[in-house]
Image (tube, rainbow, N blue to C red):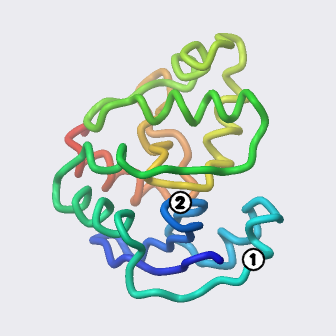
Amino acid sequence: MLFKTTHRTPIGLLYLISSEDVLLGAGFRSFEDLLERMDPDDSSLEAKNVKTIPIISDLIADYFAGDFSALGGIKVRQPGEKFSQAIWKAMRKIPAGKTLSYSDLAARAGSPAAVRAAGTACGRNLIAPIIPCHRIIKSGGALGNYGYGLETKDWLLRHEGAL
Protein backbone atom coordinates (compact mmCIF):
# COMPACT_ATOMS: atom_id res chain seq x y z
CA MET A 1 0.00 0.00 0.00
CA LEU A 2 1.25 3.43 -0.99
CA PHE A 3 0.38 6.69 0.72
CA LYS A 4 -0.13 9.88 -1.30
CA THR A 5 -0.42 13.41 -0.01
CA THR A 6 0.39 16.96 -0.96
CA HIS A 7 2.24 19.49 1.15
CA ARG A 8 1.61 23.19 0.61
CA THR A 9 4.92 25.09 0.31
CA PRO A 10 5.80 28.72 -0.49
CA ILE A 11 6.61 27.57 -4.06
CA GLY A 12 3.54 25.44 -4.69
CA LEU A 13 2.28 21.97 -3.85
CA LEU A 14 4.85 19.27 -3.15
CA TYR A 15 3.47 15.85 -4.13
CA LEU A 16 4.60 12.95 -1.93
CA ILE A 17 4.30 9.19 -2.36
CA SER A 18 5.56 6.75 0.25
CA SER A 19 5.54 3.13 1.20
CA GLU A 20 5.02 3.41 4.93
CA ASP A 21 7.95 5.51 6.21
CA VAL A 22 10.05 5.33 3.01
CA LEU A 23 9.59 8.16 0.52
CA LEU A 24 9.42 6.84 -3.06
CA GLY A 25 8.56 10.04 -4.90
CA ALA A 26 8.46 13.78 -4.26
CA GLY A 27 8.12 16.64 -6.69
CA PHE A 28 6.31 19.82 -7.66
CA ARG A 29 4.38 18.51 -10.74
CA SER A 30 1.80 15.78 -10.05
CA PHE A 31 1.22 12.33 -8.64
CA GLU A 32 1.03 11.01 -12.22
CA ASP A 33 4.50 12.38 -13.01
CA LEU A 34 5.95 10.60 -9.98
CA LEU A 35 4.11 7.31 -10.56
CA GLU A 36 5.30 7.17 -14.20
CA ARG A 37 8.93 7.35 -13.06
CA MET A 38 8.73 5.08 -10.02
CA ASP A 39 9.73 1.43 -9.94
CA PRO A 40 6.86 -0.51 -11.60
CA ASP A 41 6.68 -2.85 -8.61
CA ASP A 42 5.95 0.17 -6.41
CA SER A 43 3.75 2.18 -8.77
CA SER A 44 1.47 -0.82 -9.34
CA LEU A 45 0.52 -0.93 -5.64
CA GLU A 46 -2.78 0.49 -4.43
CA ALA A 47 -2.37 4.14 -3.39
CA LYS A 48 -4.34 5.67 -0.55
CA ASN A 49 -4.80 9.44 -0.26
CA VAL A 50 -3.92 10.60 3.24
CA LYS A 51 -3.88 13.98 4.95
CA THR A 52 -0.26 13.55 6.06
CA ILE A 53 2.39 10.84 5.98
CA PRO A 54 3.70 10.19 9.51
CA ILE A 55 7.21 11.51 10.11
CA ILE A 56 7.77 12.49 6.45
CA SER A 57 5.18 15.31 6.39
CA ASP A 58 6.46 16.70 9.69
CA LEU A 59 10.08 16.69 8.51
CA ILE A 60 9.15 18.45 5.26
CA ALA A 61 7.21 21.08 7.23
CA ASP A 62 10.27 21.55 9.45
CA TYR A 63 12.49 22.08 6.37
CA PHE A 64 10.23 24.77 4.92
CA ALA A 65 10.08 26.38 8.39
CA GLY A 66 13.88 26.70 8.35
CA ASP A 67 15.21 23.45 9.89
CA PHE A 68 17.43 22.51 6.96
CA SER A 69 18.72 19.34 8.60
CA ALA A 70 15.18 17.89 8.72
CA LEU A 71 15.28 16.36 5.22
CA GLY A 72 18.17 14.13 6.28
CA GLY A 73 15.78 12.24 8.56
CA ILE A 74 13.64 11.01 5.66
CA LYS A 75 14.27 7.50 4.35
CA VAL A 76 14.18 7.30 0.54
CA ARG A 77 14.23 4.69 -2.22
CA GLN A 78 14.18 5.09 -6.00
CA PRO A 79 15.12 2.94 -8.98
CA GLY A 80 18.42 3.64 -10.71
CA GLU A 81 21.75 2.26 -11.82
CA LYS A 82 24.69 1.94 -9.44
CA PHE A 83 26.23 5.28 -10.50
CA SER A 84 22.92 7.13 -10.16
CA GLN A 85 22.53 5.69 -6.65
CA ALA A 86 26.05 6.94 -5.83
CA ILE A 87 25.15 10.40 -7.17
CA TRP A 88 21.98 10.59 -5.09
CA LYS A 89 23.84 9.43 -1.98
CA ALA A 90 26.52 12.09 -2.57
CA MET A 91 23.84 14.77 -3.04
CA ARG A 92 22.29 13.99 0.33
CA LYS A 93 25.66 14.76 1.94
CA ILE A 94 25.73 18.33 0.60
CA PRO A 95 24.70 20.58 3.49
CA ALA A 96 21.97 23.15 3.03
CA GLY A 97 23.45 26.51 2.11
CA LYS A 98 26.16 24.89 0.00
CA THR A 99 26.30 24.06 -3.69
CA LEU A 100 28.43 21.68 -5.71
CA SER A 101 29.31 21.61 -9.39
CA TYR A 102 28.33 18.70 -11.58
CA SER A 103 32.01 17.79 -11.95
CA ASP A 104 32.59 17.86 -8.18
CA LEU A 105 29.49 15.72 -7.72
CA ALA A 106 30.79 13.17 -10.25
CA ALA A 107 34.11 13.04 -8.39
CA ARG A 108 32.37 12.55 -5.03
CA ALA A 109 30.40 9.67 -6.55
CA GLY A 110 33.66 8.00 -7.61
CA SER A 111 33.82 8.84 -11.34
CA PRO A 112 35.38 12.28 -11.92
CA ALA A 113 35.04 11.99 -15.71
CA ALA A 114 31.33 11.15 -15.59
CA VAL A 115 30.08 14.74 -15.48
CA ARG A 116 27.32 14.18 -18.05
CA ALA A 117 26.15 11.04 -16.25
CA ALA A 118 26.02 13.05 -13.03
CA GLY A 119 23.77 15.58 -14.78
CA THR A 120 21.57 12.78 -16.09
CA ALA A 121 21.23 11.33 -12.59
CA CYS A 122 20.24 14.77 -11.29
CA GLY A 123 17.58 14.99 -14.00
CA ARG A 124 16.22 11.56 -13.10
CA ASN A 125 16.03 12.26 -9.37
CA LEU A 126 12.56 11.22 -8.29
CA ILE A 127 12.72 12.61 -4.76
CA ALA A 128 13.25 16.39 -4.98
CA PRO A 129 13.98 18.43 -2.90
CA ILE A 130 14.68 15.71 -0.30
CA ILE A 131 17.51 14.42 -2.49
CA PRO A 132 18.75 17.96 -3.14
CA CYS A 133 19.55 18.12 -6.84
CA HIS A 134 18.79 21.86 -6.59
CA ARG A 135 22.19 22.22 -4.85
CA ILE A 136 24.04 21.17 -8.03
CA ILE A 137 25.16 24.05 -10.24
CA LYS A 138 27.43 24.59 -13.23
CA SER A 139 31.18 24.97 -12.70
CA GLY A 140 31.07 28.67 -13.57
CA GLY A 141 28.44 29.34 -10.92
CA ALA A 142 25.36 29.45 -13.18
CA LEU A 143 22.36 27.63 -11.77
CA GLY A 144 22.15 25.10 -14.60
CA ASN A 145 18.94 23.18 -15.17
CA TYR A 146 16.22 22.08 -12.75
CA GLY A 147 13.31 19.84 -13.62
CA TYR A 148 10.84 22.03 -11.74
CA GLY A 149 12.08 25.30 -13.24
CA LEU A 150 14.85 27.73 -12.41
CA GLU A 151 12.53 29.90 -10.28
CA THR A 152 11.97 26.92 -7.97
CA LYS A 153 15.69 26.12 -7.85
CA ASP A 154 16.50 29.76 -7.12
CA TRP A 155 13.90 29.88 -4.32
CA LEU A 156 15.20 26.69 -2.68
CA LEU A 157 18.82 27.92 -2.79
CA ARG A 158 17.82 31.32 -1.37
CA HIS A 159 15.72 29.63 1.33
CA GLU A 160 18.79 27.63 2.37
CA GLY A 161 21.08 30.67 2.24
CA ALA A 162 23.19 29.47 -0.70
CA LEU A 163 22.38 32.57 -2.80
**Residue occupying the point 46% across, 87% down:** 50
- Could you tell me if the residues under marks 1 and 2 are in contact, i.e. CB atoms within 8 Å? no
Residue neighbourhood size for the residue with mark 1, other residues' Cα within 10 Å, grouped as few (<14), some (14–19), many (≥20): few
Q: Secondary structure at mark 1?
A: loop
Q: Position of residue 15 (x, y in %)?
A: 50, 74
Q: Quadrant of the N terminus?
A: bottom right
Task: Classify 105 as above or below 92.
Answer: above
Closest to the observer, 24 or 31:
24
Q: Amino acid at mark 2?
A: Leu
Residue 34 in the figure: left or right of residue 71: right
Q: Residues within 10 Å of mark 2 (few under 14, many from 20)?
A: many
Residue 129 versus residue 141 in the image, above or below: below
**Which residue is nearer to you in this view: 6 or 152?**
6
For the residues labelled 1 and 2, the Cα–Cα distance comes to 14 Å
Q: Residue at x 26, y 66 (%)?
A: 61
> Is residue 90 left or right of 46 when viewed as pictured?
left
Q: Which residue carries the number 2 mark?
A: 23
Q: Circle 1 is placed at which residue position?
A: 45
The image quadrant of residue 9 is bottom left
Q: Secondary structure at mark 2?
A: strand
Query: Which residue is painted at 72% across and 19% down in the image?
Result: 114
Query: Where 19 sits versus 48, above or below?
Result: above
